[in-house]
């Protein structure tokens, strides 16, 4: 059995940064601190941080005045204001790319553009983003959701984890309903390289195991992409693997979302090795063969 990992699997820059901030700040504060919502959409990492004193709360009002970490998705202006007004220390771990998206949307709105956001209107990144837009905006999940109305000044941005295909389709639709169209491709490259790596891997695998939180938007997107090409299972930990998935399978692909830590990838890899009756387990993700289509090498 050949087991290969998708290129660029696992933690992205913004997630790594947020976790480093949480760990560093937890060390400094014996009385603990809170995160507004899970710091990342990965229950295993959230639990590890909880053990270090970083407790997840649902809202800014629930932290009992403790220093509060704003996660990589960002937080709405109203909630930041609440914390400032109530002397709650804000530890900002908003991903710089998300911050750039917020600033760009805000600027374009102030310049009179009607803003179209490609994204999930319930996702925390989008909820926070819309708070930075003073004028009119619309959140759509696909081109078909755009209102058929003509706009003089239209601007389009995207939630960082959307696919380029969906963004392209949306832009193409918007060209027909606008005089001036300002396009800002805010899809994070960490997202697109993970999606491309997964697509290439899926095309060349009998099954693909996607590792990551069930609530993680970018991991769910990887599972959707992979399932277009091959049998795909989305799991959070190695405990969900089933022996029967690997019967008569030669090429196994593994990919992981931007919020999936290396430990979980290694555990899954080693479990598959065991299921296959091998004992050559690995200690580090860097030891796993990576699928690279262009060079046709593993
Ligand atoms: S996927 Fe991109 S935008 Fe989102 S946290 Fe990671 S680096 Fe930041």
Image (cartoon, rainbow, N blue to C red):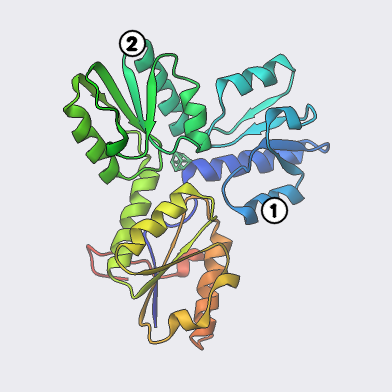
Residue 127, position as x, y percentages in the image? 51, 30
At a point 38% along the width and 87% down the height, the residue shown is 248
Residue 96 numbered mark, or none: none
Q: Is residue 205 left or right of residue 18?
A: left
Q: Is residue 173 left or right of residue 156?
A: left
The mark total stands at: 2
Q: Residue furthest front?
A: 148
Q: Please tell me how crowded label 1 is: few (under 14), some (14-19), or many (20+) other residues with Cα within 10 Å.
A: few
In three-dimensional space, the C-alpha distance between marks 1 and 2, rounded to whole angstroms, equals: 44 Å
Query: SS for tag 1?
Result: helix
Q: Residue furthest right?
A: 31
Give the number of the mark in front: 1 or 2. 2
Residue 111 numbered mark, or none: 2
Q: Quadrant of residue 28?
A: top right
Quadrant of image for the C terminus? bottom left
Q: Quadrant of ligand 1?
A: top left
**Residue with the mark numbered 1:** 48
Q: Please tell me how crowded label 2 is: few (under 14), some (14-19), or many (20+) other residues with Cα within 10 Å.
A: few
Q: Nearer the viewer, residue 228 or 107?
A: 228
Mark closer to the chain start, 1 or 2: 1
Residue 39 visible at all:
yes
């Amino acid at each position: 059995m050949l087991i290969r990992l998708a290129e660029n699997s696992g933690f992205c820059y913004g997630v790594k940064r947020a976790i480093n901030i949480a760990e560093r700040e937890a060390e400094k504060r014996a009385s603990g601190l809170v995160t507004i919502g899970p710091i990342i959409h990965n229950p295993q990492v959230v639990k590890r941080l909880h053990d270090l004193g970083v407790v997840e709360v649902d809202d800014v009002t629930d932290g009992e005045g403790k220093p509060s970490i704003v996660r990589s998705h960002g937080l709405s202006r109203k909630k930041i204001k609440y914390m400032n007004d109530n002397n709650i220390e804000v530890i900002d771990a908003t991903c710089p790319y998300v911050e750039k998206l917020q600033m760009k949307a805000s600027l374009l709105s102030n310049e009179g553009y009607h803003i179209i956001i490609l994204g999930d209107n319930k996702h925390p990144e989008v909820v926070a983003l819309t708070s930075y837009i003073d004028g009119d905006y619309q959140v759509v999940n696909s081109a078909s959701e755009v209102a058929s109305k003509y706009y003089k000044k239209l601007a389009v941005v995207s939630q960082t984890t959307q696919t380029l295909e969906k963004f392209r389709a949306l832009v193409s639709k918007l060209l027909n309903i606008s005089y001036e169209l300002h396009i800002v491709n805010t899809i994070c490259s960490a997202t697109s390289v993970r999606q491309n790596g997964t697509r290439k891997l899926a095309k060349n695998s009998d099954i693909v195991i996607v590792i990551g939180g069930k609530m993680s938007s970018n991991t769910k997107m990887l599972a959707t992409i992979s399932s277009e090409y091959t049998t795909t299972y989305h799991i959070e930990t190695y405990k969900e693997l089933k022996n029967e998935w690997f019967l008569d399978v030669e090429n196994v692909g593994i990919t992981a979302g931007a919020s999936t830590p290396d430990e979980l990838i290694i555990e899954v890899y080693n479990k598959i090795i065991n299921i296959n009756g091998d004992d050559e387990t690995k200690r580090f993700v860097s030891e796993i063969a990576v699928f690279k289509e262009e060079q046709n090498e593993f």
